[in-house]
Amino acid sequence: MVQLRGHDFSAEVADLVRSCAAGATRLPEQAAYFSCCLQACAGFTFMLTHADSGVGMAAVTALLPAVVGAVMRMPLPGDSESSAPGDVSDAAAYAMLTVAALDDGTRSAILSDPAVAALRAAMQRRLLVHGGVVAEAGEWWMTELEEERGQVIGEVTLTRLEMVHAAVVRTAPFDDPRVNARVLEAICRMYRGEGMGGASRSYRVAPTFIPCTSALLALLEKNPTGDSAAWTLALCAHRLDAVLAVLAAPAGGEAGGEADLKIAVSVMSALVSMKRHLADDAEALLGASSKEELRVQLSRVGLAATLDRLTRLAFRAADLAAGAASDAAVQDLAQGLAGIPTLAGVMLYDMRHLIGCGPDGGLLVTLAKRAVMVTRRLHELEGRDGERELLAGIVGSLLPALSHGMNAAQDSELTGPESASLDAVAFLGRSACLLVTQVASRAVARRVGVTTAINLHRVAMMNALDYLKNSLSSAVGRYQLSAAQVLALQPQRLLVAAYKLLCAHDDYATLMPHLLLPVLVLHTRTEPELRTRVHAAAAALALPPPLVMPLAEVAFKDLCVCANAACTSYGGRAEAELPLKRCGRCGCVRYCCAACQAADWKAGHKRECKARDGP
């Protein structure tokens, strides 16, 4: 109870609170006074939740229903421009923060009070309005006044808006999937700066929503819907982006630690949850009435763009970790996000008939860009420290993601405005072929474990060979590569790497039955001498030198991607959002910054750059 020198003041405070609503009704000219008093009492009740003893919580349970009841009964002031509306709004904010601070049992009991339940519903509707999401008409004048002004009301409410909304999410019943999706949409809109006046400015992407995300993940397990899962992923991406921005800042910051690991776990959990519920009848499992409805939902949320953004964030985290080997928090965060590219690729493939990558290529371009970078890095680390570690990351995450992305991109039914451009598909295919060639040649030298190599090269190498085979067929409409673009895949090197891979271990020969080479390799099992000679010849066989093709004939001129093979810029939500500028001389390639242009010029663009003939 609220005690002073042994006297219990709970009843007196509760009576004071009740008199505020009654007084404002009888004496409207004094509404500002009564509203200020109510705000003070609500703030006092919230402060009691931080009391160390059970006395404070007992006082809270006694006072909170009275505070909430007074808030809901406070009339609309005759002078709406006075301070009264702001004080009532702040009293409601303190009340919601108090409810959210209670333990589960106490909160459940408090929410059974009709006035508290009514406030929660009203605050949920306010959250939607703050986020610019159309909400059904309500009975509380506060929300209508905010809609009329186009501005969030209340100083405390505005400065703590993210916390207030988090309290609404934590106390929501989650019994209507459609409402849940709209709440998530409103939150994401405020993070994007698309909310009501003042709402977006007060959102700071603080760790407030970490526990909310956990609650939403639990909801997805019970009643998964496509749009709710997609909005949850988008929300996680906003938080993760802010965390990485702080970690990358020269002065550092307070990011890192347990909170950031929780957001990594939340992202992975949401991806795994959504993937698990995907099946042939995905539209039923994800709460939609038809495949077309689910397609519309996921397109409106922008799931494909979110998968691309999450993958780029995972790559950013990995690059930060590579430059901060002694920072345990950064290392743990990067490790927690390492599985995102593979899961994103799997989801893109599983949902290839529901979501596309957009005309700019989206996830396909991001994966291809990463493949180009690590291919170059492998070449630089040939036989040196760090090569095995890099190979482990490629084999464990990037190659599976590339394989799933290629499978999705090569699906002939992936058409329409959301399908990726042919240049994006070709860029992914070329990048994958060049990377697989490098990794396969190292598997021969046993720099990759045999079991891992068998399992992954069965997919990666076969996908690369299939892509090469299809690229040579003019009957396959998704490819349409010129002769120069086919040669840019370096087929002579890929085929030699495949042959070396087959000869490196007997089990490899059973993985590629569509090749003629396995016949010879399998035959050597019964001919020991022949086997020895074939394996020795394969091991000694060097990869042929790469073919040099004119840049103008092989460049993807219309593709938005930085041409610097060493580029590690993943700052935009998509590659196309980077400030890309064409090379002013040849016009064949683009760069995200002057540093990347200078680096690529030294790395070889100087030799291949030729002035354009026309404008």
Image: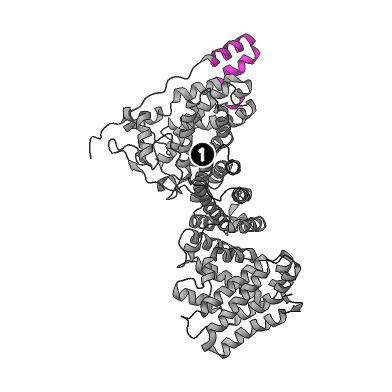
In this rendering, the answer to whether 10 lies above or below 131 is below
User: Residue 161: horizontal and vertical position, in percent?
Assistant: 54, 66
Q: Quadrant of the N terminus?
A: bottom right
> Residue 345's spot in the image, x, y percent?
54, 42
Residue bearing mark 1: 319
The answer to whether residue 311 is seen in the rendering is yes
Taking the magenta stretch, the answer to whether it contains residue 353 is: no
Kind of residue sitting beneath label 1: Asp
Note whether residue 353 is visible. no
Where 120 falls versus 440 (above or below)? below
Give the main secondary structure, helix, strand or loop, of the magenta stretch. Answer: helix
Outermost residue, bottom direction?
Answer: 26
Number of numbered callouts drawn: 1
Q: Secondary structure at mark 1?
A: helix
Question: The C terminus appears in which quarter of the rendering?
Answer: top left
Magenta extent: 510-539
Q: Would residue 607 appear left or right of 5 to someone viewing this image?
A: left
